[in-house]
């Protein structure tokens, strides 16, 4: 390696990449000095701010150096190519994007060295929106730049900055609402445009999808079963005839507050924003994805400032921004949700497609919520919120499509969506529902509580574990589970009265002994719940 690349930069790049850069720099009579390394979110690509000294041009510039790797797809899908297309297709919006300088430099197997101009011309004047978020919430410990005035941000300014980004992405970049003639997407395809291959084996969502095989979920805080969003993504919940006519166009693909910089010095200027990291740019992506992901990212990064009691109102507001319970949420959060939604509606309303936008936004909320469920950056304690949000969004979508949104295999009576009595897949669930307290007690004596709890979780997920349960009960010293339901001693009761599963999960059917207590379901998460009478 030559002295055209300083040692600290070379060490961070690794010997192979550093040697390539050094030879290329020597050829062009350029020198590269490391200013500092950048943390690039979830990316493992080396990213650094460097000073380039060009002796031929007698010029100096600060650039962002990034080493890109082709991990999947073709070379054309590399961020370099996507970004070039983004700039070419952006028109006047290109002023909000950084630009590559020099051509990409091959640096070994499937690796390329790239240089980009600094967004906003100087990094010292800009910050990512996440910094403003944390300053506003008072939860940031980042040091202030030397000699800079302390950076502050109030809720109206932060909401205005976020709304301005959404307005720019839709009005100035995507252009008017558009659906190609005859274009329709089924729901699995719509979800895949958000979560890509993450439900496949080895993907971040594979384990979650594998554990949630049923059509419905019973979730903490919810009084009824909710559609399983993984079943929707697999094409197992709705009839295949349920399709959408997607609003598509130019999309960033990974819009969030760490990929959006804004001018903060000498003052915060919402209109002076810049988008970075266009590795997932598409010229025909689902337009509801960017605004939804943007807002959910803010929520994911500020869950510590949102009380558990506010989770349900927040979901209500996300699913219905104009009418949701904004008064039950922190003012900054309600302001953010409503202002970003207002920008999207102002964009789509002249086309007369507001209802279509609302409907597809619900699906994007469900799909993007699954993304956060699978990310290691989402704390485990926050993941139930995102699963609940995804399920509620799908349920709301079903409500908005009453003529077409019929769950596959569901009947039209009061027990719609509940598997029939004779199916092996759910018979074991009814037995466990009735006997769970005894199973749990016996398992506890042997230190097998976790295994018993797993049966409960799998029952709520609709999995078939009939044989596993039979073996488990035998190991506990109990009798072989009998999936037949009902109790003796029904004298004095109407012959047609029975007590049914209160969460419509299994075919358990009990009769109440004269003067005896109402049977209860032991699988509901919050506490045992009285079964419902078939007489209403």
Image: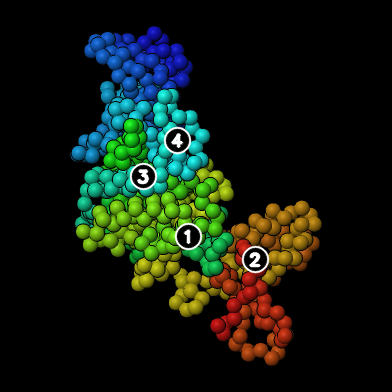
**Which element carries disc 4, helix, strand or loop?**
loop
Q: Which residue is mark 4?
A: 41
* Marks 3,4: beta carbons within 8 A: no
Q: Is residue 73 above or below residue 189?
A: above
Residue pictured at 34% horizontal, 32% vertical: 265
The Cα atoms of the two marked residues, 1 and 3, are separated by 21 Å
**Which element carries disc 2, helix, strand or loop?**
loop
The Cα atoms of the two marked residues, 4 and 1, are separated by 32 Å
Query: Depth-wise, is mark 1 or mark 2 nearer the camera?
Result: 1
**Which element carries disc 1, helix, strand or loop?**
helix
The Cα atoms of the two marked residues, 3 and 2, are separated by 43 Å
Query: Depth-wise, is mark 3 or mark 4 nearer the camera?
Result: 3
Where residue 336 appears, as percent x and y from the top left, is 39, 51
Q: Is residue 118 above or below residue 490?
A: above
Q: Residues within 10 Å of mark 1 (few under 14, many from 20)?
A: some
Q: Which residue is mark 1?
A: 328
Residue pictured at 56% horizontal, 70% vertical: 503
């Amino acid at each position: 390696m030559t002295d055209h690349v300083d040692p600290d930069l070379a060490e961070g790049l690794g010997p192979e990449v550093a040697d390539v850069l050094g030879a290329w720099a020597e050829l062009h009579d350029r020198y590269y000095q490391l200013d500092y390394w950048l943390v690039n979110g979830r990316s493992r690509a080396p990213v650094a701010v460097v000073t380039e000294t060009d002796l031929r041009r007698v010029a100096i510039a600060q650039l962002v150096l990034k080493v890109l790797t082709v991990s999947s797809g073709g070379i054309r899908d590399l961020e370099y190519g996507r970004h070039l297309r983004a700039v070419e297709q952006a028109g006047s919006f290109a002023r909000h994007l950084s630009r590559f300088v020099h051509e990409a430099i091959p640096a070994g197997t499937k690796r390329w060295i790239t240089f980009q101009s600094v967004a906003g011309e100087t990094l010292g004047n800009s910050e990512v929106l996440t910094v403003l978020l944390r300053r506003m919430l008072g939860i940031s410990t980042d040091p202030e730049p030397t000699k800079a005035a302390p950076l502050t941000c109030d809720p109206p300014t932060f909401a205005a900055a976020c709304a301005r980004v959404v307005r720019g992405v839709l009005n100035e970049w995507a252009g008017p609402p558009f659906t190609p003639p005859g274009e329709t997407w089924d729901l699995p395809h719509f979800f895949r445009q958000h979560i890509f291959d993450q439900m496949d084996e080895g993907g971040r969502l594979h384990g979650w999808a594998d554990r949630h095989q049923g059509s419905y979920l019973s979730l903490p805080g919810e009084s009824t079963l909710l559609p399983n969003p993984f079943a929707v993504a697999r094409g197992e919940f709705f009839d295949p005839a349920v399709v959408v006519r997607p609003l598509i166009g130019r999309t960033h693909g990974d819009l969030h507050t760490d990929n959006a910089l804004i001018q903060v010095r000498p003052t915060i200027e919402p209109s002076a924003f810049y988008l970075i990291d266009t590795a997932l740019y598409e010229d025909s992506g689902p337009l509801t994805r960017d605004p939804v992901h943007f807002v959910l990212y803010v929520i994911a990064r500020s869950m510590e400032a949102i009380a558990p009691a506010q989770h349900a109102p927040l979901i209500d507001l996300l699913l219905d921004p104009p009418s949701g319970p904004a008064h039950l949420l922190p003012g900054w959060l309600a302001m953010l949700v409503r202002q970003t939604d207002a920008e999207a509606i102002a964009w789509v309303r002249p086309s007369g497609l507001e209802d279509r936008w609302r409907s597809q936004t619900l699906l994007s909320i469900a799909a993007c919520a699954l993304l956060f469920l699978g990310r290691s950056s989402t704390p485990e304690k926050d993941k139930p919120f995102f699963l609940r949000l995804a399920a509620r969004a799908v349920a709301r979508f079903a409500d908005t499509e009453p003529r077409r949104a019929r769950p596959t295999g569901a009947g039209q009576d009061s027990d719609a969506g509940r598997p029939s009595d004779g199916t092996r897949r759910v018979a074991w669930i009814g037995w466990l529902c009735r006997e769970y307290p005894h199973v749990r007690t016996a398992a506890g004596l042997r230190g097998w509580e976790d295994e018993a709890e797993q049966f409960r979780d799998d029952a709520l997920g609709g999995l078939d574990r009939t044989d596993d349960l039979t073996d488990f009960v035998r190991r506990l010293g109990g009798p072989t589970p009998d999936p037949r339901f009902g109790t003796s001693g029904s004298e004095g009761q109407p012959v047609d009265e029975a007590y049914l599963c209160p969460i419509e999960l299994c075919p358990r059917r009990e009769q109440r002994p004269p003067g005896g207590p109402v049977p209860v379901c032991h699988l509901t998460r919050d506490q045992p719940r009285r079964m419902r009478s078939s007489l209403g």
